Amino acid sequence: MLVLKRKKNTVVVTDSGVRLEVVQVAQNQIFLAVRWNGGQMSLWMSLMEEITIDGHVSVQVVGLEPGACKLGINAPRSISVMREELLENPDAALAGTIWVGR
């Protein structure tokens, strides 16, 4: 599981076409906008709640703190998962990224 700390209006993308935007972080849940090839949805998610997108990428809220959340993302090894700002600046540091098992 890849764990990424995200603030409001930040995005996680995959090279398979999945886009996850943290729209809002509330005290005990987040509002997530999800797009993938062939679909889109927006939903509120609580701590430890998990969804599967397009049958191969799962996202779980593994942490909540004031103004930020931690998303746990599972995807096949063949799919790259990254913070959107790394696409804009590939030399950016990987601060806030933690790999847990695999």
Image: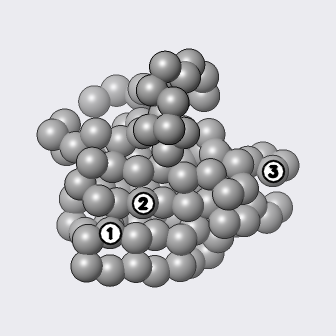
In the image, 18: left or right of 97? left
Q: Which quarter of the rendering shows the C terminus?
A: top left
Picture residue at 66% right of the left edge, 66% below the top:
23
In the image, 72: left or right of 22? left
Residue 26 percent location from the top left of the image: 79, 64
Q: Which of the labelled discs sits on residue 19, or is there none?
A: 2
* Sequence order check, earlier mark of 2 and 3: 2
Identify the amino acid type marked 2: Arg
Q: In what element is the residue under mark 1?
A: strand
Question: Spatial distance from mark 1 to mark 2, Cα to Cα?
Answer: 6 Å
Q: Residue furthest left?
A: 78
Q: Do we see residue 8 in this rendering?
A: yes
Identify the amino acid type marked 1: Trp
Question: Spatial distance from mark 3 to mark 1, Cα to Cα?
Answer: 26 Å
Determine which quarter of the picture holds residue 18: bottom left
Compared with residue 98, is residue 53 higher up or lower down, i.e. above or below? below
Q: In what element is the residue under mark 2?
A: strand
Identify the amino acid type marked 3: Gly
Query: What residue did someone put label 1 on?
Result: 36
Query: How many labels sit on residues?
Result: 3
Q: Do we see residue 48 in this rendering?
A: no
Q: In what element is the residue under mark 3?
A: loop
Picture residue at 44% right of the left edge, 38% below the top:
87
- Residue contact at pointers 1 and 2, CB within 8 angstroms: yes
Residue 24 percent location from the top left of the image: 72, 65
Q: Residues within 10 Å of mark 3 (few under 14, many from 20)?
A: few
